[in-house]
Image (spheres, rainbow, N blue to C red):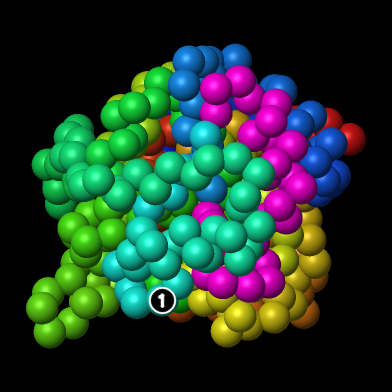
Amino acid sequence: MAEQGADRPEQDPPVAKVYFTKDISPVGLLKIYNHVKADIQGKVAIKWHSGEPHGPNIIPVPMVKALQESIPDSTLVETNTLYEGGRDTTEKHRETLKVNGWTFCPVDILDEAGAVMLPVKGGKRFKEMSMGMNIMNYDSMVVLTHFKGHPMGGFGGSIKNIAIGCADGKVGKAMVHGSVPENTWACSQAPFMENMVESAKATVDHFGKHITYINVMRNMSVDCDCMGVEAAKPTARDIGIVASTDILAVDQASVDLLYKLPEAELHDLKERIESRGGLHQLEYAEQMGLGSRKYELISLD
């Protein structure tokens, strides 16, 4: 089955392969990962979202555990947060990891020992981005994302996961959010989307072909997992798992699948996405050459 997102450019971009399954389980996750893992090799970072303490919507531990155990020489990786909460220091973050059940393997907090600047090739907003320095210790990255809404980005997919999630907690995240001393969350709408895309591009370019993307579309609150127990309850049904080696295609396909829901279920997430100008993530990612908005959706069911 083939799908294409809206508002395509006049030129004919390459068609990305995007895989889909309705099976949101460890079995379904491993099945879909097998289709996008060809270039994952060496020491592997699995970038996921650890979530604030007791967060109700994070990807279930058994799914993440099954994936990590299936990937040789792999490690879960995260960074500390800019905002105060359960993860703004390494000490607090490690306590939250225990609370949320991320105890089945070591977790590398990438910015625990500092940051490194990665180039943003072709960026108009940044020439480089500050990342957790331990990112340099890995040969490949699997981006495992809980797809959901986001208070500033409208939605959080694979782009958001690495754009904010690989940036170090003190400098990189402040760069992405456009912070100034009197207003930590100064940047909004189009500038924020563009900042995220350019930050994501630094990580994508760093790993080259040795990076792949999986979006898990379940428990899709309008709020990010950074909201923890305060996150709004989801009003949309669970959809499935989407995966691709193309970061733009995987997020475009996820948005397209979401927008096929009945209005009663779609309403809250659509309002969140469009009120924040979140679709500009996709437009700008295309401009930045991050991937293709044209894709073939391949069902594995």
Residue shown at 42%/67% (left/top)? Answer: 92
Displayed quadrant of residue 64:
top right
- The percent position of residue 32, horizontal first and vertical second, equals 74, 31
**Three-letter amino acid code of the residue under disc 1:** Gly
Residue 81 drawn at (x, y percent): 35, 64
Residue 67 vs residue 262, the one in the foreground: 67
Residue found 46% across the figure and 21% down from its top: 43
**Quadrant location, the C terminus:** top right
**Region in magenta:** 49-74
Q: Which quarter of the rendering shows the N terminus? A: top right
**Residue placed at 22% from the left, 77% from the top?**
184
- Was residue 62 drawn as part of the magenta stretch in this picture? yes
Q: Does residue 41 appear left or right of residue 186 in this picture?
A: right
Q: Is residue 183 visible?
A: yes
Question: What residue does disc 1 label?
Answer: 85
In front here: 185 or 102? 102
Label 1 crowd (10 A; few <14 / some 14-19 / many >=20) = some
The quadrant where residue 217 appears? bottom right
Residue 208: image x %, image y %? 37, 22
Instruction: Report the residue at 21% width, 47% height from top.
Output: 114
Query: Does residue 68 appear to the left or right of 238 in the view shown?
Result: left
Say if 87 sits above or below 23 in the image: below
